[in-house]
Image (spheres, rainbow, N blue to C red):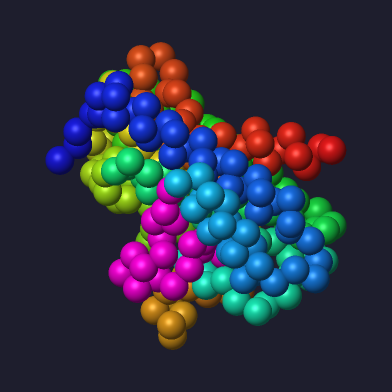
Amino acid sequence: MVRPKTEEEIELLRINGELVSKTLAEVGKLVAPGVTTAELDRVAETFIRDHGAVPSFKGFEGFPSALCISVNDVVVHGFPSDYILKEGDIVSVDCGTFYKGYNGDSAYTFPVGEVDAETAKLLAVTKESLYKGIDAAVAGARVGDIGYAVQSYAESFGFSVVRELEGHGLGTKMHEEPGVPNYGRPGRGTRLPEGLVICIEPMICAGARGVYLARNGWAVHTSDHRNAAHYELTVVVRKGRAEQLSTFEYIEKKSIQ
Ligand code: MG
Ligand code: MG
């Protein structure tokens, strides 16, 4: 069932959105060649707990860590590990928080040092496809309008859209109705009511869109082992223009310094 949130609920979701945004910025400050992904996870977990919240991914269906950290051909759900980031890698960091009964959920793909031009383009296009999806998430539109906006933009650059995973509603639970696929047809699917809170999260591949699940049952890899990027923001559906509850502003301000 699709249930719009009250303004009181949205306020709690906004607090969580701020916290995931700031946590991702803390992680982003550390991303560099020579750093292990486990170190990024430790910093995030400490930051989240210092703010009185809980890292919602940890323990979720047995997930071992605060962050999902997915390097290069891992699309999503990678485990933080002793892997040492190296120049030219990309690292997708997905962060979830739980505070006062509500969830936060956002993700960002960071370049490690200098990446090649094709990879830089993959990151830029994936992030922009998320904003195209947000533009489409207005009250009265349908879920298919979001998917179409993401897909048509990403595919116009020759990239492909992962079909097996999708965005979702957000509230007291980490995943609520509706599912928000990153592909679709305009005018199709669930109608978006004002006050609905959703996570839009394009997962875009440099090569073919096929994926497979690693033997650990979590990490999702591209079948052709080319890179994939993942960006996610939480928004409230509003009339005329969705309102962001999370932001990349903290990350991108820091990267300019
Ligand atoms: Mg997420
Ligand atoms: Mg999500």
Q: Which quadrant of the rendered structure holds the N terminus?
A: top left
| Residue 167 in magenta stretch | no
Report the quarter where the C terminus lies. top right
Residue at 58% across / 47% down in the picture? 23
Which quadrant of the view contains residue 92? bottom right
Q: Measuring 29% from the left and 24% from the top, which residue is drawn there? A: 8
Vertical order, 14 against 239 (above or below): below
Q: Quick check: 198 left or right of 47? A: left
Outermost residue, left side: 1
The answer to whether residue 181 of the structure is visible from this angle is no
Give the x, y percent position of residue 106: 49, 46
> What count of labels does the image hold?
0
| Residue stretch in magenta | 53-69
**Rendered view: 128 above or below 206:** above
Q: Is residue 175 left or right of residue 72?
A: left
Whole-percent x, y for residue 35 in the image:
75, 68
The picture quadrant where one finds residue 206 is: bottom right
Q: Percent position (x, y) of residue 42? A: 59, 64
- Residue located at (76% from left, 39% from top): 254
Residue at position x 39%, y 79% in the image: 217
Residues 130 and 9: in front is 9
Answer left or right for 1 relative to 49: left
- Residue 221 pos. (x, y %): 52, 72
Q: Residue furthest bottom?
A: 215
